Image (cartoon, rainbow, N blue to C red):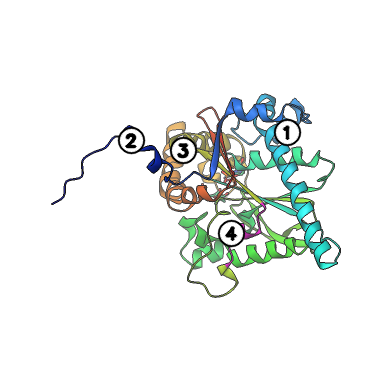
């Protein structure tokens, strides 16, 4: 038997160290990241941030200034660069440049704060002269209706990849990218916990479309032989993964459940009406049980493994503030 001596990393020769795979990301702490946009104006006010904040998310103008101002500047540079590239292709082909929306994906766990990130970005990007029309879409609308989930035995798998009509989502995105005048998607309601029959979201040729969802960075299924070999993220020009420690996200989920119990769950049409009258202890137990049986396994098995596919990773601390930003540079 050959014994391999333990070698500390300090003893690895310099020329071998350079062979280690380079990370595709540049890793910046909050202060370094926020210094990158000194000359970019901050277009939002305290009132705007109050309006855009999600339930339980303490985001404030300071956070928007430190984290979202540089991000909106970076995205503005990218949008202009892609427009230039489309112009180059069109000039080469002797064609008019196409007007296709710039598509941004926002991924991350349930309760991590994706929708707040998406709403803030929408507002910031809309203030740039080159992208006045920014639309937002959540992939919740592409969940199968509850009746179909029940038929497939998937009611306890909401948010898992198999609970979505992936083909319909891909069809939707291909129409968006083709520059179709009007593209429609089903509407999901958190209150009734289901697709709303007969209602649609209509997207009309925006300059930027932000697509937010748990599953947006999932790779294509390798076994499929039809259009589903395409991944949702193939339609993205840029993607953001909102990241945090699982134990913090679990806490945010439970806190939000307690808040919803006093608000949305009270509505007669709420699917969770049955939880409205639970005591604090009972509500915490119920929320933890949903978290541990559905949202945590989905995070671990399906969402976290897609983090390395994102263009940008925002890492939040226990106080929801972004502590670290990783930007793909390769
Ligand atoms: N059962 C519910 N009833 C009413 N509103 C809800 C319910 N669950 C979530 N919401 C609201 O809908 C918003 C979006 O919730 P959703 O579950 O899609 O977000 P998420 O996936 O947890 O992501 P994030 O918190 O990252 O935006 C939340 O901010 C919350 O206020
Ligand atoms: C609709 C999703 C899947 C994503 O937004 C999520 O909010 C959800 O309902 N998850 C299922 C478990 C739960 O009710 O938290």
* Mark 1 secondary-structure assignment: helix
Q: Residue at x 51, y 30 (%)?
A: 317
Q: Quadrant of residue 8?
A: top left
* Mark 2 secondary-structure assignment: helix
The numbered mark, 3 or 1, whose residue comes first in the sequence reads: 1
Q: Residue at x 79, y 58 (%)?
A: 88
Q: Position of residue 237 (x, y in %)?
A: 67, 53
The numbered mark, 4 or 3, whose residue comes first in the sequence reads: 4
C-alpha gap between disc 1 and disc 2: 50 Å
Front disc: 3 or 2 = 2
User: Which residue is tagged 1?
Assistant: 51
User: What's drawn in magenta, residue-wise?
Assistant: 230-237
- In the image: residue 122, left or right of residue 181: left
Q: Position of residue 220 (x, y in %)?
A: 53, 63
The numbered mark, 1 or 2, whose residue comes first in the sequence reads: 2
Mark 3 near mark 2, Cβ–Cβ under 8 Å? no
- In the image: residue 189, left or right of residue 134: left
The numbered mark, 3 or 2, whose residue comes first in the sequence reads: 2
Residue 204 in sight from this viewpoint: no
C-alpha gap between disc 3 and disc 2: 36 Å
User: Which residue is tagged 2?
Assistant: 9
Residue 143's tag is 4
Residue 250's tag is 3
């Amino acid at each position: 038997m050959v014994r391999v001596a333990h070698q500390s990393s300090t003893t690895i020769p310099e020329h071998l160290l350079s062979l280690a795979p380079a990370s595709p990301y540049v890793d910046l702490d909050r202060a370094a990241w926020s210094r990158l946009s000194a000359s970019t104006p901050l277009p939002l006010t305290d009132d705007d941030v109050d309006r855009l904040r999600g339930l339980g998310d303490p985001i404030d103008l300071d956070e928007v200034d430190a984290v979202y101002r540089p991000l909106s500047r970076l995205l503005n540079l990218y949008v202009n660069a892609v427009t230039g590239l489309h112009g180059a292709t069109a000039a080469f082909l002797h064609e008019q440049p196409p007007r296709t929306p710039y598509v941004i994906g926002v991924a991350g766990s349930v309760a991590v704060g994706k929708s707040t990130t998406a709403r803030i970005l929408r507002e910031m990007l809309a203030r740039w002269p080159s992208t006045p029309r920014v639309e937002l879409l959540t992939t919740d609308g592409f969940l199968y209706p509850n009746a179909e989930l029940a038929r497939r035995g998937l009611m306890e798998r909401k948010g898992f990849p198999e609970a979505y009509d992936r083909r319909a989502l891909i069809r939707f995105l291909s129409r968006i990218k083709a520059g179709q005048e009007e593209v429609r998607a089903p509407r999901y309601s958190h209150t009734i916990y289901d697709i709303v029959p007969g209602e649609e979201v209509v997207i009309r040729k925006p300059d930027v479309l932000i697509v937010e969802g748990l599953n947006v960075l999932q790779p294509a299924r390798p076994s499929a032989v039809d259009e589903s070999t395409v991944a949702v993220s193939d339609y993205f020009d840029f993607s953001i993964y909102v990241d945090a420690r699982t134990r913090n996200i679990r806490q945010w989920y439970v806190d939000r459940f307690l808040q919803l119990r006093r608000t949305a769950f009270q509505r007669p049409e709420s699917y969770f009406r049955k939880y409205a009258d639970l005591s604090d202890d009972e509500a915490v137990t119920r929320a933890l049980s949903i978290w541990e049986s559905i949202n945590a396994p989905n995070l671990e098995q399906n969402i976290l493994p897609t983090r390395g596919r994102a263009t940008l990773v925002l890492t939040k601390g226990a106080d929801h503030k972004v502590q670290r930003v990783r930007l793909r540079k390769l």
